[in-house]
Image (cartoon, grey):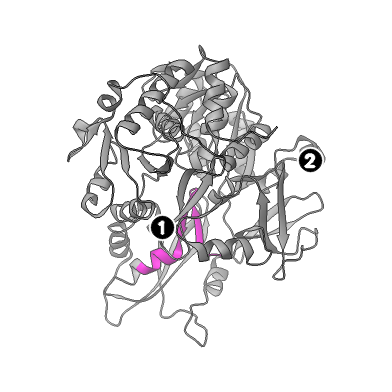
Amino acid sequence: MQVDMTTLDFLDRATDVYADVTGVIAHDGTEYTYVEFADRVNRVSNALLDSGIERGDRVALLSPNTHYFLETLYGTNQVGATFVPMNYLLVPEDFEYILGDCEAKIVIADYEYAANVEAVRDAIPTERFVGYRAEEIEGEWTGYEEWIAGQSSDPPERPEIREDDDAAINYTSGTTGDPKGVCRTHRTEHWHALVLNQHMEIRDDDTYLWTLPMFHCNGWGHTYAITGTGGTHVCQRTFDPEGTFRRVRDHDVSFMCGAPTVLNRLIAYHEEHPDVGTTGGRDVRLATAGSAPATSTIETIEDEIGWRIIHIYGLTETAPIVTTSNSPRRLAERGRDLKVNQGSETLCTDVRVVDEDGADVPRDDATIGEIVVRGNQVMDRYLNKPEETEEAFNARLPGYFHTGDLATIDADGMVSIQDRKKDIIISGGENVSSIEVEDVLYDHPDVAKAAVIPTPSEEWGEAVTAVVVRKPAADLAEEDLREFVGGRLARYKVPKRVEFVDDLPETATGKVQKYQLREDYWESEERRVGTE
């Protein structure tokens, strides 16, 4: 028998098997059983239908980690529309591009972030604007609770939804500046959730705390995996250490995620408050990704705070999880230092490290090649970018997605990232296009030349660093330039460091040799990527 894999299966199972279980705990502590949550999802679906949303239309959401993020996700998928979660840290120009690129029919936005959409309202094709706590938003926005209040809680009539239909479009930083819409089908989302369950050890008695932004590839798939397994979601709007420790204790949290910079902030808080309780009644495990965590970070989290670290690797295009070092067998053989590696391929995933000709590099943990991936959880395509899609799947080895990450692989199939092929910096778990930042720097009237590179940072893993040549006689200070960039880009893209130099190393054709600049900062590091 062949049955289409769709995202609808996860909430359907939760209501069938765990109707009376607390499925979602909102930021303010309000609890919803799975049947109560499903009733609200149905109201969202019916409100979307009344707003003219049809199968294939795009529904954009701008929200931190909230119960209505989860409601909108499932409410959108249930009517066959495509969910477009947006990074709430972006600036109006980013939203203008994203909403225009995906042609969103409706935007649902949180009161704290809606102003950045309102600022470009007249420049986007969106027809309907719904705001959570709309009375706190300037402009004409329909209140979210009022929007769904008059709707039936009965399930809508579902259209035919096929597994190869788009379930979500997730935008990620592009190396040319413009974000790229990663199209993820019902099949890729469904398959990834099953793989996630296996390697994250998710069970129906898990209580999952949302410290990871839900917009990140739909929360690394936990929006589906936790729900379908019957666990409990605990929403925390945005990360803060005090709130995290408190919710771990109050809700007996057993599982959460976070980039290494999140771990470092938790460690700093724990050092300042050594008596803070770090667990409820159960053991806690924490999955981390982005830059690799430092060995000292892992030791502190596991030995002093008492949580078990699971290190994973992936990209928005790959679900994200495609490797993990969560291997009790290998850990027993090789020790805890293994956790700083990105790990070996996940279930039913083909991960290879290949040279320029597409041939596998030796498994000697020394020869560097590019990580390429093939699996059912890998994206379908980049929206409206056929050439970029073709390149991504065929650059070195046809039929594999090319990550742009350069790594070694050892005899056990464990990969270890050493460098990046593309102009992406991962700072605090967020992707930053160096070219996008350079474009803004060149708009400053006192900048003659500029190059943006990653430099090592204990706090951020990789710090966005601008190496700048001033124009003759220009009186340009670091803070002036940071303020200039901050007025045009999201704050996580603003250079943490600005270095002024007399000139930049260039090729004969005038191309800046970034590898030379990077060498000055990374020469004492084993890898050319950040560890936090």
Toward the top, the furthest residue is: 20
196 with respect to 511 (left or right)? right
Q: Position of residue 107 (x, y in %)?
A: 31, 41
Q: Position of residue 432 (x, y in %)?
A: 45, 57
Q: CA distance from mark 1 to mark 2?
A: 37 Å
Secondary element at image label 1: loop
Quadrant assignment, res 311: top right
323 with respect to 455 (left or right)? right
Q: Nearer the viewer, mark 1 or mark 2?
A: 2
* In the image, residue 46 above or below residue 82: above
Q: Which residues are magenta?
A: 422-439
Residue 427: give its label.
none
Q: Disc 2 marks which residue?
A: 330
Q: Let me know if residue 231 appears in the view.
A: no
Q: Position of residue 223 (x, y in %)?
A: 51, 32
Q: Position of residue 136 (x, y in %)?
A: 20, 33
Q: Residues within 10 Å of mark 2 (few under 14, many from 20)?
A: some
Report if residue 430 lies within the magenta region. Answer: yes
477 with respect to 180 (left or right)? left
Q: Mark 2 belongs to which amino acid?
A: Arg
* In the image, residue 2 above or below residue 350: above
Q: Disc 1 marks which residue?
A: 496
Identity of the residue drawn at 36% across and 24% down: 43
Quadrant assignment, res 503: bottom left
Of mark 1 and mark 2, the one earlier in the sequence is 2
Q: Let me know if residue 160 appears in the view.
A: yes
Q: Mark 1 belongs to which amino acid?
A: Lys
Query: Depth check: 375 or 479 in front?
Result: 375
Quadrant assignment, res 515: bottom right
